[in-house]
Every structure is written in C-alpha cells, then in structure tokens.
C-alpha cells in the first residue's frame, strides 16, 4: 500500500522528483569521481617506481635524491664515482642495478643516460615494465629513445636526428651540435616521468661531453675515433637504483652504503620516501575530499528542501489520506519512503554516470595530468560511502515527515483565507 502511494505521489510531482534525483545523482557522481581521482593521483604518485629496493646517490637530502632520480627534477648535490657503482653492484646481495646520469636536456625535457638494465628491469605501478611503441634499446653511442610525450609534442619518429642541449634550461644557448643523436625507439605511454624523458646510453653521455671539460665547447675538431665505445671511459654517475635478492637484506645494505668509507654516499628506500613526500603535499588531497563532501551535502539538502517545501502544498493530500483511514504513522512512513526512493534512484543513476564519465575522462586525465584511473567495480569503501549517502538522504526526510505527522486532520481540511 505504502509503495503504491509513494509511486503515485512521486508521479504527481514528476518534475520536482526528477530534480531531486538529478541533484543526488550529480552529487554521487562528483563525490565518487573526486574520490577516484584523489586515490588515482595518490596511487599514481606512490607507484611511479616499484620493485626497486634502494636508490643510491651522493650525500644530501633524501627527498632531493628521489626527485632527481625518479622524477628528473632538480640537480644532484654531487656525482658519484663509477668505481663506487661497480663496487656496490658486485655485492652478493644485489640482483640488478640501474645506473642514472643526468645533466643535459632536449628542448626542456631531461636527458637520462642509462644502460639496458633500465629497459629490462625498471618497473612501475606494480609489475608494469617499460615497453616500446616502436624501435629498440639504444646500444650505439649516439642512439636515443624518446618518451611518448616528447615524441608526440615534437612529432618525432624513429630515424630522425636530434641535437641535445647542455644543461637543463628550457632555452639553452649551448648545444652539442658536433654530436647529433639518432632516434632508434619511442616508448609507450606510462603516465610517469618516463614519458617526458629522453634516454641515451652512458657512452653517449660521455661522448657528447668530450671537449666540454671547462663547461663550454673548446671549439677544437675532435677525432671521430674518440667517440667509439672502446675509446670511451665512464667516470661518474648521478645515482643508481638497486634491487636485492632478498627484501630482508634491504636495511643491512642501506646501512652499509650510508657507512661507505670510500665516498660520501647515501641510500633511500623509494617506497618510504614516496609515502613521506605524499604526506608533505597531501593537503591537496584533503581539500579535494572536503570539496566532495560539500557537494554531497548540497545533494542531501536538496531532498530536505524539496520535501519540506512541498508539505504546505500537500496538506490537503495528507488530510484526504487521513480521512480515508490512513493514520499519522502511515503519512510519516510515506514521506520516509519517498526520501529513501529518491536517494536510492539518485545513487543508482550516479554510479552509472560515474562509469560513463570515467570512460571519457580517463584518457584525458592520463595524457594531461598523468593520473591513472583504472575502471573497476566499486570498492568496499565506496559501498560504505553509498550506504552513508542513502542513510543521510533517508534521515533528511525525517524533518518533513515529522511536520506532516504533527499536522492534524482538522488543520488539513480547513480552508484558510
């Protein structure tokens, strides 16, 4: 009986009911959408690098070491000797290592010198590895591989020549014109700093700085024989990544590196450093959460306002129900059913809109903001939020329901002038 009356009552107020459902649906979509973006931003940030146990660099700040090694931001305090890298690399606890050398750029994008271990072992977002859209690993001295964003922005392809710049300024006036590189590969998008990097091998880094010992080109003609791998010697690195054979040995090796007596170096655990860094900038996440709560509050209040303002218009409707035998309890229950139904439909449509919106927004967020959103079923937390929204919306109907309950039969049937 109550269900039928609820349906008929809402049918008689189609437009008002539609606005209530639309308001809740938009609130749910925005609330869950912001939550997913918030979580996606955090997970994308903290999963920029995975399966790497330690990052080793010159003594300095842990955050600085993380930024220039993983995010290619800022500069190193100092470089470390190649012999130090070889020493730690040969440790029996080490499974693999990835050397990193920085210091140059290409039109504002950082140049990262490394070796084949980067393309074979570097992982992000769990167990995802670096993959090639086209081409292959740089092996020759002047081979270069581009991140997807670099290739897309400048419309570059395999086989094209490029000139790298000295330093990391976006508009460098010093270029390595005498050592042009050739693009041999382009990487698939990763939504990580890899997309905005230019990768060369370590020999290429050494070769293009021949004659730059004073920081500027000497102007002398350089014998091409010096550019061959067998004639190049790697002397220093910016930092390197390490994966151990056993996670149990992480703290031990970290302590040994921090106490290394041949050179002042340090080691950080990237997972911990990323968490600490996110906590530092986590106020943005909290602001997003507060915004989503405010949006949701507006939706719940819309139900309260709609039902409450309709009470005076429906006094005669309630009175007729009472005269036909409906008790005050039935009138009270009717309004509670209405608010529950409106919230339920709003939640249902809101969830559907969320998945529809994610389908269109996902590629745009990934390409422009590197926010990776995986389209997956609602999590336990999201189900909990929906339950909370349903309860809050239902409770919002209590105030107009109590007012209707208090209205007497005589007040409802009296015509007021």
Image (cartoon, rainbow, N blue to C red):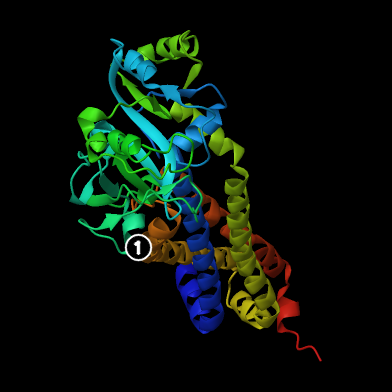
**In screen coordinates, is 12 left or right of 208?**
right
Quarter-wise, where is residue 64 in the image? top right
* Count of numbered circles on the image: 1
- Residue 231 visible? The answer is yes
In the rendered view, would you say 100 is above or below 358?
above
Between 155 and 169, the one lying in front of the other is 169
Q: Which residue is mark 1?
A: 154
Residue 278 in the image, given as x and y percentages of width and height: 54, 38
**In screen coordinates, is 394 left or right of 272?**
right
Quarter-wise, where is residue 217 in the image? top left
Between 187 and 352, the one lying in front of the other is 187
The residue at 37%/12% (across/down) is 249
In the rendered view, would you say 125 is above or below 361?
above
Rendered-image quadrant of the C terminus: bottom right
Residue 7 in the image, given as x and y percentages of width and height: 46, 74
Between 182 and 274, the one lying in front of the other is 182
């Amino acid at each position: 009986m109550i269900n039928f009356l609820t349906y008929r009552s809402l049918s008689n107020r189609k437009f008002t009911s539609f606005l209530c459902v639309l308001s809740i649906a938009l609130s749910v979509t925005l609330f869950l959408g912001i939550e997913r973006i918030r979580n996606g931003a955090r997970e994308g940030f903290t999963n920029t690098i995975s399966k790497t146990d330690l990052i080793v660099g010159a003594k300095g700040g842990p955050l600085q070491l993380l930024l220039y090694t993983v995010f290619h931001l800022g500069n190193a305090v100092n470089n470390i000797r190649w012999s130090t890298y070889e020493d730690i690399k040969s440790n029996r606890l080490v499974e693999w290592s990835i050397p990193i050398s920085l210091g140059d750029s290409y039109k504002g994008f950082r140049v990262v010198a490394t070796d084949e271990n980067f393309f074979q072992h570097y992982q992000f977002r769990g167990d995802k590895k670096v993959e090639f859209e086209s081409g292959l690993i740089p092996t020759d001295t002047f081979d270069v591989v581009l991140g997807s964003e670099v290739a897309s922005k400048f419309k570059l392809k395999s086989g094209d020549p490029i000139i790298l710049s000295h330093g990391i300024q976006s508009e460098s006036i010093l270029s390595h014109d005498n050592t042009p590189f050739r693009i041999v590969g382009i990487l698939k998008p990763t939504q990580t700093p890899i997309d905005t990097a230019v990768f060369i091998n370590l020999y290429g880094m050494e070769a293009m700085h021949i004659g730059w010992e004073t920081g500027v080109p000497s102007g002398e003609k350089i014998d091409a024989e010096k550019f061959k791998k067998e004639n190049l010697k790697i002397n220093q690195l910016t930092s390197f990544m390490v994966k151990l054979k056993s996670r149990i040995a992480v703290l031990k090796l970290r302590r040994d590196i921090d106490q290394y007596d041949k050179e002042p170096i340090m080691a950080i655990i990237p997972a911990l450093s990323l968490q600490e860094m996110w906590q530092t900038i986590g106020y943005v996440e909290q602001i997003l959460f507060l915004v989503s709560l405010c949006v949701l509050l507006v939706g719940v209040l819309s139900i309260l306002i709609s039902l409450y303002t309709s009470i005076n218009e429906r006094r005669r409707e309630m009175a007729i129900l009472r005269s036909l035998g409906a008790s005050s309890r039935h009138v009270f229950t009717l309004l509670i059913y209405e608010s529950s139904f409106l919230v339920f439909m709003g939640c249902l449509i809101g969830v559907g809109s969320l998945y529809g919106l994610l389908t269109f927004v996902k590629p745009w967020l990934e390409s422009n903001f590197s926010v990776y959103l995986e389209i997956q079923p609602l999590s336990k937390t999201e189900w909990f939020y929906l339950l909370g929204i349903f309860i809050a919306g239902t409770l919002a109907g209590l105030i107009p329901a109590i007012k209707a309950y208090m209205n007497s039969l005589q007040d409802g049937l009296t015509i007021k002038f």
